[in-house]
Amino acid sequence: MTSTIYHFPELSRPDCGLFRGPGPGLGNLLFPIARALQAQRQTGGIMVFPTMRQIKIGTYLRREKDKRTYGEIFRPRTLAEVTDWFSATMRRKRLEIDADLHAQVVRYVGMGRQFHDLSPDSDFLRQFLWDASRMPVPVHRYDIAIHVRLGDFAPPDASATQQNTQVPLEWYSEALGAALELLGGGVQRGILFSDEAPEAVIGKLGLEGFVPEPQGNALTSILLMSQAKVLIGSRSTFSLWGQYLGQSHAFWPQGFDLAKYKRPDAEKDIFV
C-alpha cells in the first residue's frame, strides 16, 4: 500500500486544532508553513492547514496595537482540512507503535535556515496566503512601501547587525531619497506600515504621497507590502517577507547582516 505523507507545519505546542500555545510573530511562523507547502509541491502528499490562533498575554501587557493572537489571519478550515489535521495528529502519536500504519507525518518546526530553505519562486506561497487570508486583500501597485518597526524592538543602535533593533527614523528619510533616485522620479503612490500609528509616523517623517496602511491584519499588511516596486525595510522578517513575496528591490540599513536570513541579491538588495 502506498504511504500517505502529511506535511504538518507545527507552529507551537500544544496544538489543539482550534488554538495552540504561545509562539513567535507571523514573520517567523511563515517559515514552517512555507517549508511544508514547498515540500508538498515537490513530493506530493497532503499539506495540513495550520492552526493559527495562539494564546498570548505579553502583547496585552505591553498594550501593543497588534496583539498577535492570529485567530483572524486565515480563513476557517474546511471539513476536509479538519479531517487531515486530525488524521495527521493521530498518526503522529501512533507512528512509533503501529507498524501497520501506512502514513508518514513530517513535521515542520521553527524558522530553519529561513529564506535559505525556500525556492526563489515565491508565487506558490503568495497564492496560498492570498487564498487562505480571512480578510480580502486589496490589489494596489505602490511605488514605495516603508516598514517602520518600533514596538517590541530594542532602541535604535547604529552599529546593530541583527533583527530586533529599531532603525533610526532619520535613516528612513535617507533611504527614501535613494529609493526616489532608483525610481527616477517622485512618489505617485506610497504606503507606510508600522506597529505604531502609521499616520503619526508619516507626519514625523514628513512624507508626501504616502498613505497609512488600511485596517487589516498582519497577513494583509505583508501581502500589501509585496505589491510595491521598492521596499524600505526594517530589521525584521516581516520586511523580508514583503520583499520575498513581491521580489522587489529593497533598501536595508548599512551593516545589517542580511546573509543570516537570505542570500543577498546584488541587484535588488541595496544598503544605505
Image (cartoon, rainbow, N blue to C red):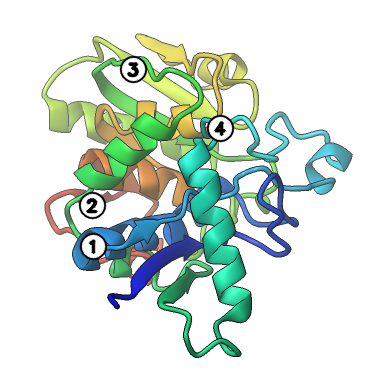
Q: Residues within 10 Å of mark 2 (few under 14, many from 20)?
A: some
Residues at circles 3 and 1 in contact by the CB criterion of under 8 Å = no
For marks 4 and 1, give the one nearer the viewer.
4
- Find disc 3 in the rendering and name its residue: 190
Residues at circles 2 and 3 in contact by the CB criterion of under 8 Å = no
| Left/right of residue 126 with respect to residue 172 in the rendered view | left
What residue is drawn where x is 64% and y is 21%?
197
Q: Residues within 10 Å of mark 4 (few under 14, many from 20)?
A: some
The kind of residue on which mark 1 rests is Pro
The kind of residue on which mark 3 rests is Gly
- Find disc 1 in the rendering and name its residue: 264
Point out the tag, 2 or 3, that comes first from the N-terminus. Answer: 3
For the residue pair 202 and 98, the one nearer the viewer reads as 98
For marks 3 and 4, give the one nearer the viewer.
4
- Find disc 2 in the rendering and name its residue: 269
Q: Position of residue 89 (x, y in %)?
A: 59, 65
Residues at circles 2 and 1 in contact by the CB criterion of under 8 Å = yes
- Find disc 4 in the rendering and name its residue: 76
Picture layout, residue 61 above or below residue 133: below
Q: Position of residue 148 (x, y in %)?
A: 52, 35
Disc 2, SS? strand
Picture layout, residue 26 above or below residue 141: below
What residue is drawn where x is 55% and y is 72%?
91
Disc 3, SS? strand
Measured Cα–Cα span from mark 2 to mark 3: 19 Å
Point out the tag, 3 or 4, that comes first from the N-terminus. Answer: 4
Measured Cα–Cα span from mark 3 to mark 1: 25 Å
Q: Is residue 235 visible?
A: no
Q: Position of residue 205 (x, y in %)?
A: 50, 22
For marks 4 and 2, give the one nearer the viewer.
4
Asked where in the image residue 63 lies, by quadrant, the reply is top right
